Image (cartoon, rainbow, N blue to C red):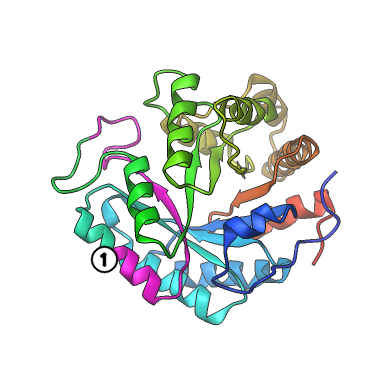
């Protein structure tokens, strides 16, 4: 069963996510994306204010393809570091950047007080299934980005993981090889894409452990509040919605009942993951707090 209360941070904003994960306390974390306008900004900060009392291990802020949200991501993560008790983690991708530009982004994060970064190859502008085209003077693989940041120092490093395999991976084993390579390059923890079967997560962990890599892997949680939208997103990133879950959702017609079923399914998955030894849960919030809090209520997580 899940923890009865939320874990308290041990070293304040800007602290080491890797150290907190090594401490062994169940980790709860939230992901946000940079707002596009004033209304989105207000919604984001309302979610942050609502979730802050739960004292998450960290919160992450995503990074638009090709650096499209660079300035906003730096600004939001910096403000979280300065004005809240939260530990922020900023994303950074290889897409559309030279090494010099990547170094400049890292300088901006360091200046803003951000000490934790999520490093990804990133998706091509055409989508995650499009062919990869390297940027002249840039990097091609996430492991190269990890090596660069590791050599530079000053940041804890997280990377992405794919329970059902990355869309471009030749096989689940090949995908596990990539994650193991990122760990050996200096990654200190990983966060998975959304998934809906605990067995997919534990299969990934087993494959990585079989490669001699003891990397903490946080499962990424996305409740199904709109089945069609989740299916569309899943098709892009290589995540499937199992038939039994589709059947549970589709037996309802009322939107409120569909939402309640989706929250219930997510809470069940969270319980299975924690009972099976997952080091914590990472919630994709879509810059809202309600669904996460409803899951927390089911798990008996309290402020």
Disc 1 marks which residue?
A: 104
Q: Residue furthest bottom?
A: 83
Residue 45 screen position, x and y as percent: 54, 72
- Nearer to the camera, 38 or 80: 80
Task: Judge whether residue 281 is colored magenta.
Answer: no
- Residue drawn 69% across and 34% down? 253
Residue 124 screen position, x and y as percent: 28, 40
The quadrant in which residue 227 appears is: top right
Helix, strand or loop under label 1: helix
- Residue drawn 54% across and 56% down? 31
- Nearer to the camera, 120 or 145: 145
Q: Along the horizontal axis of the image, is 180 left or right of 298?
A: left
Quadrant where the N terminus sits is top right
Q: Along the horizontal axis of the image, is 203 left or right of 232?
A: right
Q: Along the horizontal axis of the image, is 297 left or right of 237?
A: right
Q: In the rendered structure, which segment of residues is drawn in magenta?
A: 105-132
Quadrant where the C terminus sits is bottom right
Residue 194 screen position, x and y as percent: 56, 38
The reply to whether residue 38 is visible in this rendering is: no
The quadrant in which residue 91 appears is: bottom left
- Residue drawn 66% across and 29% down? 202
The quadrant in which residue 20 appears is: bottom right
Q: Is residue 141 above or below residue 245?
A: below
Q: Which residue lies furthest to the left in this view?
A: 136
The reply to whether residue 179 is visible in this rendering is: yes
Badge 1: residue crowd in 10 Å (few <14, some 14–19, many ≥20): few
Residue 176 screen position, x and y as percent: 49, 27
How many numbered marks appear? Answer: 1
Task: Judge whether residue 106 is colored magenta.
Answer: yes
């Amino acid at each position: 069963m899940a923890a009865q209360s939320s874990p308290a941070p041990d070293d304040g904003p800007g602290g080491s996510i890797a150290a907190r994960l090594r401490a062994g306390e169940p980790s709860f974390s939230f992901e946000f994306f940079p707002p596009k306008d004033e209304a989105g900004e207000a919604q984001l900060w309302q979610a942050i204010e609502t979730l802050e009392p739960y004292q998450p291990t960290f919160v992450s802020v995503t990074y638009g393809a090709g650096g499209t949200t660079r300035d906003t991501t730096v600004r939001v993560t910096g403000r979280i570091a300065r004005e809240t008790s939260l530990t922020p983690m900023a994303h950074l991708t290889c897409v559309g950047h030279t090494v010099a530009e990547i170094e400049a982004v890292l300088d901006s994060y360091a200046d803003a007080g951000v000490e934790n970064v999520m490093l990804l190859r990133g998706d091509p502008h055409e989508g995650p299934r499009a062919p990869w085209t390297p940027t002249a003077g840039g990097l091609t693989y996430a492991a190269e980005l990890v090596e660069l940041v590791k050599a530079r120092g000053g940041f804890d490093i997280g990377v992405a993981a794919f329970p059902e395999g990355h869309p471009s991976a030749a096989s689940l084993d090949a995908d596990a090889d990539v994650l193991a390579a990122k760990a050996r390059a200096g990654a200190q923890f990983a966060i998975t894409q959304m998934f809906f079967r605990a067995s997919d997560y534990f299969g990934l962990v087993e494959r990585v452990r079989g490669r001699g890599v003891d990397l903490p892997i946080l499962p990424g949680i996305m409740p199904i509040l709109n089945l069609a939208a989740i299916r569309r997103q899943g098709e892009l990133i290589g995540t499937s919605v199992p038939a039994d879950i589709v059947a549970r959702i589709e037996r309802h017609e009322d939107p409120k009942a569909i939402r309640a079923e989706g929250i219930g399914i997510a809470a069940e998955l969270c319980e299975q993951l924690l009972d099976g030894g997952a080091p914590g849960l990472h919630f994709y919030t879509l810059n809202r707090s309600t669904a996460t809090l409803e899951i927390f209520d089911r798990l008996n997580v309290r402020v």
